[in-house]
Amino acid sequence: MTISTPMLNLKNTGKVKIKLYTTEDKDTWDTFVRSSKNATFLLYRDFIEYHRDRFKDYSLLFYIDNKLVAILPGHIVDKVYYSHMGLTYGGLIMSQDTTASQVLMIFEYLTVTFRHQGIRKIIYKSIPHIYHRQPAEEDLYALFRYKAYLSSRGISSTVYNWDRVTYSDSRKNGLKKANKNNIKILINSNLVNFWNIVDKNLKNQYNKKPVHSLEEITYLQEKFPDNIKLYTAVDKDDSILGGCLTFETDKVVHAQYTAATEEGKNQGAIDLVIDHIINIACSNKKIFDYGISTEDNGYYLNESLIYQKEGFGARATVYDTYTIDL
């Protein structure tokens, strides 16, 4: 279905068409994601739609002179367009050939069309630069041009594999403790037991539940076995002490969930798991991203959490959300 757009008087532009995504576009969408310069497996339809019951999809495809140049995952709630509440990031996905001028055209047509439809705001989660295959910040420039303001900034902790910062003494001591206790690392085992630890820790520390249910993360791991992996630390009896579930892209290993039992924390289990990911699992990747340590749209920094991450030599990468008032 093509969205009805008002007539615009733009100079030096081609013919722009905005198409509302339908299931018939799945192959077109996924093929574009695969060859894009800034998307990851989180932007494939099978990932976007794992929680389709929670979000009514309103994803868009942008054509200029009948050529697909960009796609945008999203949904609408109370006259606000989100890109995308159910995803860590979900901004404009662009091809290698998409230009800055084309992105400006897309934002022009998008903002005018949304005003025409009565949409009040666009909430836009940009894709952090560490996930880009090629430079892809044309959207950030367009956001500036269309008066977007920064409405949320999360701070994540990132290790560049080619230029690392030395571990802190506390992390070194944790590794010594883990090795002294003969802890070993297993891959893709005990997802159920690990999820029980994640669930218990989040409930005890923050009175929260994991973003994904066990059923959802099991489904996603089955759909994306090369991208979603579990590294667990176990004792001599193979009892799980802790672990880290990772989301892995072409360039980045991202720590999505990290948790340990009290015994595991005391024995340095997490230190050993993260060290294994950085030095072994991440050895063929450029970046290890340890995840966000902020809450309340970035206004609260969990200093003890980020201190632990910085102990591995991780330093700041920001995850930004922008708002355009229409």
Image: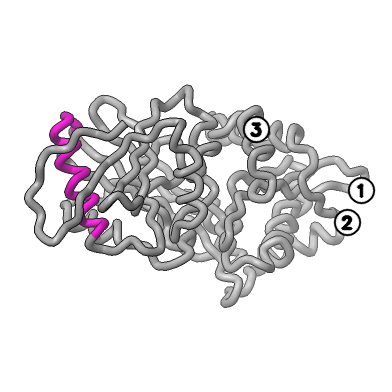
- Distance between the Cα atoms at labels 1 and 2? 7 Å
* Residue at 25%, 61% in the rendered image: 141
The residue pinned by badge 1 equals 236
Q: Position of residue 144 (x, y in %)?
A: 20, 57
Q: Which mark is residue 219?
A: 3
Q: Which amino acid type is marked by label 2?
A: Asn
Identify the magenta region: 102-119
**SS of the residue at dot 3?**
helix
Quadrant that contains the C terminus: top left
Q: Amino acid at mark 3?
A: Tyr
Residue 308 can be seen, yes or no: no
Q: Residue furthest right?
A: 237
Image quadrant of residue 290?
bottom right
Q: Quadrant of the N terminus?
A: top left
| Pick the front one: 225 or 85 | 225
Is the Cβ of the residue at disc 1 closer than 8 Å to that at disc 3? no
- Callout in the foreground (1, 3): 3
Image-based side of 117 in relation to 88, left or right: left
| Left or right side of 162 for 80 | left
Q: Name the mark on residue 182.
A: 2
Res. 255 visible in picture: yes
- Color theme of the render: one colour
Distance from label 3 to label 2 (Cα)? Answer: 33 Å
Q: Is residue 117 magenta?
A: yes
Give neighbour class at mark 3: few <14, some 14-19, many 20+ (Cα, 10 Å): some
Disc 1: CA contacts within 10 A as few (<14), some (14-19) or many (>=20): few
Where disc 2 sits, the SS reads loop
Q: Earlier in the sequence, mark 3 or mark 2?
A: 2
Viewer-proximal residue, 175 or 133?
133
Residue 301 image position (x, y, % from top left): 43, 50
Residue drawn at x 31%, y 46% is: 62
The numbered mark, 1 or 3, whose residue comes first in the sequence reads 3
